[in-house]
Amino acid sequence: MPKTTLLERFSKFGAVIFFPAIFLLACSRTPEGIIPENKMRKVLVDMQLAEAMIYMEPSAYRSTGKNALYQSVFDKYQLTEAEYDSSLIWYGKHLDQYMRIYNLALADVKQQIAAIGDIKPAMAPSSNVDSLDIWIFRKYYEFYPHALSNTIIFDLQPDDLYSSGSAFVLSMQVWGITPDMQDPVEAHLKACQDDTTLVVKRTIRQDGYHEILLKTIPTKKVQRVYGYIRLHTDGALFHKIYLDDFSLMKYKYGSPAIERNDSLAAANMEH
């Protein structure tokens, strides 16, 4: 597999981070024992860089090497793993606020990488063809017990807006879900059109091929497509959950492919 640079992983078209669900409150105050927001932002930056390093050089960080890399982040900020885990649980209840801190941390990562003199970032693909796979990230992920990373976050913001009324279909193969897991995998797919955000939510409860359809308003272009896929462990015993063959198809308004699959769940609106 050809190597990719860090800046390619964190370019202006958006980024996908296979990363813990860390969600921050708008208020700057946190309970005693919880990592404050400003410090958490810095921890996020280093954790994102660590994840990218592991992804690009997996053989160099097998088992103890990976743990040592995470521990170096804890040591830098004088944290214990228990303090970090407790903070994840507390912050994990505030998804909307997470995106604000996540975007700030992502901007910090880009700035650090750009200072190294890396290559120019690419752009998210945009086209007027009837169908186009716009998923530019990894095709394969794993969820596993006690992982630091059991959330996939993706964000696509093309320079040339997606055409009015575009429909998007996120698809993936999933296997490894056990019968005792209740609502194990949750997926959100969202699109922004001016002051409107369209949202589709799907819970994946069994192995197999899954599709999520998001239709947008026919009279407005699409500025952004984003979302997340995360694991709910709920105490169930499992080895690993595998997610493979990712695609995010963009279809023009009125595409026959969408009309043939109109039985998929329609989008809910959030203004």
Image (spheres, rainbow, N blue to C red):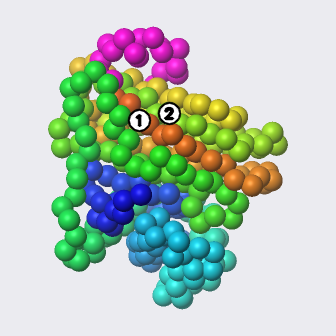
Which of the two residues, 268 or 176, is positioned nearer the viewer here? 176
Residue 267 visible from this viewpoint: yes
95 left or right of 32?
Answer: left
The residue under label 2 is which amino acid type? Answer: Ser
Residue 106 visible from this viewpoint: no
For disc 1, the neighbor class at 10 Å (few under 14, some 14 to 19, many from 20) is some
Which of the two residues, 138 or 218, is positioned nearer the viewer here? 138
Q: Quadrant of residue 91?
A: bottom right
Q: Which residue is mark 2?
A: 171
Residue 18 in the image: above or below residue 82? above
Residue at (46% x, 33% y) in the render: 170
96 left or right of 107?
Answer: right
Q: Which residue is mark 1?
A: 248
The span from disc 2 to disc 1 (Cα, nearest Å) is 6 Å
The magenta stretch is 251-271
Which of the two residues, 124 or 266, is positioned nearer the viewer here? 124
For disc 2, the neighbor class at 10 Å (few under 14, some 14 to 19, many from 20) is some
Quadrant the C terminus occupies: top left
Q: Are marks 2 and 1 in contact (CB under 8 Å)?
A: yes
The magenta stretch spans residue 12: no
Q: Quadrant of residue 251?
A: top left
| Residue 106: image tag | none
The residue under label 1 is which amino acid type? Answer: Leu
Disc 2 secondary structure class: strand
Residue at (55% x, 58% y) in the render: 21
| Mark count | 2
